[in-house]
Image (spheres, rainbow, N blue to C red):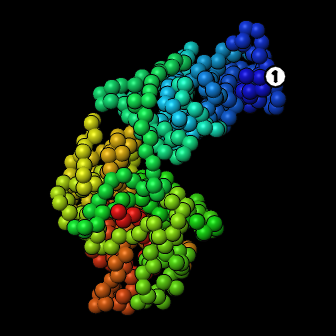
Amino acid sequence: MSGDEVAIYGTAGRAIFSTSPLTPATTAELICQEGVAGEGTYRAFYPSTLTTDGVNVTLPAVQNTVDGSLAQFPMYAQSDDENLSFKNLCGALVIHLQKSDVEVSSITVTADANINGRFSITYAGVPTLRYLDGGSASTTLLCSQPQSIANGKDFYVYMPHGTYSSLCIEIEDAEGNICTKTTKPNVTTYIHRSQTTRINLGANHLTFAQRFPQGMLPGQFSVSATQQVRFSQGILQYNPASQIFRFAKDQCDYTLKGHSLELFSFDTMWREYFGWGTGNNPNASKAELDNLTGAPFVDWGINAISNGGNQPNIWHTMSKEEWDYIVNLRPNAASKIAVAVVGSERGLVLLPDNWTLPTGCSFTPGFTTDGQDYSLNTYSLSEWKRMEAAGAVFVVNAGLGVFMPAMPFLGRPEGFFFSGTTAGTNYWTSSEVGPDVLLFPGQDPDAGGIAVNVTGVRIDVNDYTGRSACYPVRLVKYE
């Protein structure tokens, strides 16, 4: 298109060129806007933002819709002279949707391999991509405004050339309702470079479900003989600058994922480690918390959670007894719990009371005493989408995995805490430590709460359940 920008790298560096269409329409003149490429072998990238080093390319996790086409379909050219023949780097998945009275706002495609992030290019007449790092298996196509599919409409998502044994397509309508479709087991989807692969979904295939409150997962879990709950979509997070609570975007997500504490500003980051019972004071320091001996527990669910209905008192923290009922006491409890790996994250899988294993998925219940045998269950992100849609819950082991300085916002710059793949992650419950329990020498009774350890599937009093311990929270809604 006229005005599109191309980055060209040569021996002298990088130059940015704008395009001016010629005749025939498949050709264009490049007009230099800035920089000097020099001579020698030229490497050209479209769009110009596709690369930052002139060697590797980054495919985005979010794409934008273009009516009947693709937005800035990535291309590459390599030549020893100024005549550049651009080749497509990807193929296109064309999703045709048709259903009356529905407007689509976004489509998310999840595969069984990384489909965005940083890729290297091997060029032998045509380019070949190889995944390097920094990506994920999910790419979202955003509509600038809701798109009617009453008369049928094609949506284009570009993906790397590859053979995909599993695809999950999540369609969101203008009202925030969701329709999730997955490819059939043992049906392979081929994406060929510079070609289109088509998936047709008509009215009989598209059923949208409301999510109320927002952020709630579908599975129902008994926490007593008469009470059931549904879990939130992810762990609780809090931003001290805006004083807003939210849920993590999914069950595998957490702020510190893959990062060191030094990378964050503790005044602005989304925090997910809290002192016990701090629903009314999530910024409480260690000194403040230690002085609250005997004070009552304040649930985090008293707050409005921005992506969880945005109203107070919808969500609650489960007690130790309720966790114990889910894990050990409900009917067939032992057959509905296991350690697992989802994507690259370790944690605990819980199956709902009423469970039907999705076609093409597997589940092996059980765990070892120390919780280290994660090989029992391993799911790609697209496989997990099927499990989650059927009601399964994943309690992620959201630990750092290394010794790090304790959270400064809890006033413990001198201390250390450990939470990782060896020790597992403790999640707070609403239950208090009993009056006759001494957590450790020098600490008063009634100093804190009871946590559940997700790795060893233990529900007990941990050595560090004082109010100022740093643990995440997973909230539920009572049915």
Residue 323: image quadrant is bottom left
Taking the spot 28% from the left edge, 40% from the top edge, the residue there is 358
Q: Can you name the residue that lies furthest to the front here?
A: 101
Q: Quadrant of the C terminus?
A: bottom left
Residue 464 placement (x, y as % from top left): 37, 77
- Out of 244 and 87, give the one closest to the viewer: 244
Q: Quadrant of the N terminus?
A: top right
Taking the spot 32% from the left edge, 51% from the top edge, the residue there is 392
Residue 141: image quadrant is top right
Q: Looking at the picture, which amino acid does disc 1 mark?
A: Ile
Residue 297 placement (x, y as % from top left): 42, 81
Taking the spot 81% from the left edge, 25% from the top edge, the residue there is 32
- Out of 357 and 275, give the one closest to the viewer: 357
Q: Assign a secondary structure to mark 1.
A: strand
* Residue 390 falls left or right of residue 44: left
Q: Can you name the residue that lies furthest to the top here?
A: 24
- The residue carrying mark 1 is 31
